[in-house]
Image (tube, rainbow, N blue to C red):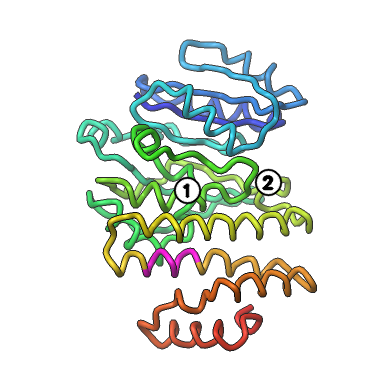
Amino acid sequence: MISIIITAYNAEKTIEKCISSILENDYNNYEIIIVNDGSTDKTEQIVELFASDKIKYFSKPNTGVADSRNYGIEKAKGEYITFIDSDDYVKNDYFENLDEYIKEGIEIIKRKAIIVKNDKEEKIEGETFDKCTGEEAFNKLCFSDKYIDTLWSYIIKKSIFAENNFQFSKDRFHEDFGLLPLIILKAKSMISLDSYNYYYVQTEGSIMRDNNLEKEIKKSEDALYHYDNIIKQIENYNLEKRTKENIKIYCTNCILQKLKILKGDEEKKYINKLKKRKIYKNIKARNVKQLIKKLILLINIKWYK
């Protein structure tokens, strides 16, 4: 069985479409776990309209999306879990062809998505591949798929969370970035399918697109927190040298993205934090482009922006 976890906070405008899109699928071996994260609107009343054996509803005080996801994982009864954001929706073939991979016991199944923005749709391109190890999968994805750390792309065997004590970091932004690379690297098997079953809706009020300065500062701090943790954790992983190099390059690229947002004093503070981490050492000069990037980071990080 697949447990679909939906965390919702003030999702009255979108959650009906989200739930309906799942129920429209001709597939029965799943459960929907809805975690209401302290909503103050009509989210609960809307969810109650869908009362069925398929839907398990939980209401809790507002503690953030990461903590709510952990809560949903605890309540999940399925062998596999996946996540759907409450403002997104799925196709009516969302479960198509999954059974063959589940029966084979593949630990992570990755699929693609369609971005919906201003009523326009755009397919998210990315690497596809047959069964391989999580380490091999990460090396395939880290330089070719900019949506590698979007949680909704993955169907994950629940045992990976239990066996590795994996949890999303509470009260932190970018919790997907902080955990998904580690989950992938721990997987014994993974596959990436060329199927577009998920609609990723970009709205002005989205948590990842709110240009509030205070939030952007917090996001930059949290990105560094996750960076530090991943760099520390992988030292205990049994990985090839090149894989560890790739993880460091990937994580460095992620935290450098914050330079596009921060300005003035906040930008200076962030650059100083990057300098202390000596991030230029993470870039391996395997080609001319990487060599130039390494030199820029060594000489003047601000030039990189």
When the figure is inspected, residue 63 is found, relative to residue 172, above or below; the finding is above
Q: Residue at x 58, y 70 (%)?
A: 256
Q: State the predominant SS element of the stretch in magenta.
A: helix
Q: Quadrant of the N terminus?
A: top left
Q: Residue 54: x and y, percent? A: 46, 16
Q: Residue 216: x and y, percent? A: 72, 58
When the figure is inspected, residue 55 is found, relative to residue 160, above or below; the finding is above
The foreground one among 95 and 185 is: 185
Disc 2: which residue: 206
The residue furthest left is 104
* Side of 124 relative to 16 (left or right): left
The residue under label 2 is which amino acid type? Ser
Q: Residue at x 39, y 57 (%)?
A: 234
The foreground one among 271 and 302 is: 271
Span of residues in magenta? 245-251
- Kindly indicate the quadrant of the structure image that contains residue 166: top left
The residue under label 1 is which amino acid type? Leu
Q: Residue at x 54, y 64 (%)?
A: 254
* Side of 32 relative to 240 (left or right): right
**Callout 2: SS:** loop
Q: Earlier in the sequence, mark 2 or mark 1?
A: 1
Disc 1: which residue: 179
Q: Residue at x 32, y 65 (%)?
A: 243
Q: Disc 2 to disc 1, how far (Cα)?
A: 21 Å
The foreground one among 56 and 96 is: 56
The foreground one among 153 and 284 is: 284
Instruction: Tell me if mark 2 has few (under 14), some (14-19) or many (20+) residues whose alpha carbon lies within 10 angstroms of its own.
Output: few
Q: Is residue 207 magenta?
A: no
